[in-house]
Amino acid sequence: MNRPAPAPSKILADLEQYQLNWKPTSIADHTLVVPTMRPFERILTPADVGTKILRKGDSGEAVSELRIRLAGFGGVLPGTAFDENLVQAVKQFEKDVMSRTESGDVDEAFAVRLDQFAKDWPINFEKQLKCPCGKCEGYGKGQFKGEYTAKYAKSKNEAGHKYEYPGIHRSVLWASRALMYYATLDQKNKIKFNMFSSGYRCHIRNQQKGRPTTNHMGKALDMNFSYNAGKSWVFNRLSDVEAMREIAKNRLAAKMGWASPNHFSMESAAQGAKTWVHIDVRAWAEKYRADVYFCKDTIGLDGTEMVTLLARSNGKTRIDPNKSQIFNPKMPAE
Ligand SMILES: [Zn+2]
Ligand SMILES: [Zn+2]
């Protein structure tokens, strides 16, 4: 059922409130990152966005972006279609984040809230995600695409793929934001995200550490959480890590291990993940790991604001001096 479009005055008032409310947040990160995204300017008018609603059956740039940014809401894969999986992800976001009746429709309020979600959960690439080897630029050197370690030379299993992906997969980063959020929601602020203890690790880093695994060459993140013990926070308890893995299973449809194709994968405590949650996209099909899905900084991750993309899908041009010219990826066809 269609909701009537809100009155233009209401939209402008909402936009204004959104701007007023916007502030950098330190919830997700003790080091306080100021997001690269800025509150939008008053270039946007109600006619640009207010009447446009994206829904099942639609496609285009905005839909492809929704499939990345809602990855943590049920485990949506990259692609181009507004299909039933995306409908379910939209509904989950409406229910869990927006506290509004589920419709499966992406309207202006949804886009604004999704943009706000990125600002609520800033990600620190410089201090937490770049490769610490001191030799590469932070994300390997793009080496060894299509080459495999001896153990996987025959099977060509992604577990042994030596490729240094060009950054970190945007879907796993957006999914990590969902996990940060659900920690506060499902654990009622008893558990909160602390930091990424590991992001990118190139081949040089592996040599330095004597590691054989290639997961962290763009596909994986290690997340640390802390527990509210009243007056102080306790870091990296196994019970909290396990609680967060349960949340990842329930909310992100993540699985233990790599036997479930096209799901987020997690390592168990027995496999070493005793003080962190390891999550990766190793079990995703190759087309979902195309270079275009990887990013190296906040601009690459958050790209153009969803309100702008919604305006564009409405045939309107909104000039965004901050980013439109910088980030305009062509998504590969599904
Ligand atoms: Zn490196
Ligand atoms: Zn890991």
Image: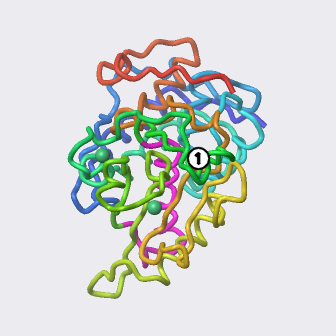
Secondary structure mainly formed by the magenta segment:
helix
Q: Is residue 10 above or below residue 183?
A: above
- Say whether residue 180 is visible: no
Residue at image x 36%, y 47%?
A: 202
Check the image and tell me how it is coloured.
rainbow
Of residues 300 and 139, the one nearer the viewer is: 139
Instruction: Classify the position of the C terminus by image quarter.
Output: top right
Of residues 244 and 42, the one nearer the viewer is: 244
Residue at image x 23%, y 55%?
A: 32
| Residue 99, horizontal then vertical, whole percent | 58, 56
Kind of element beneath mark 1: loop
Q: Count the marks: how many?
A: 1
User: What's the amino acid at mark 1?
Assistant: Ala
- The residue that mark 1 highlights is 71
Residue at image x 53%, y 48%?
A: 149
**In the picture, residue 271 is in which quadrant?**
bottom right
| Residue 129, horizontal then vertical, whole percent | 33, 51
| Residue 54, horizontal then vertical, whole percent | 66, 29
Q: Which residues are magenta?
A: 168-193
In the picture provided, is 106 more to the left or to the right than 1? left
- Say whether residue 195 is visible: yes
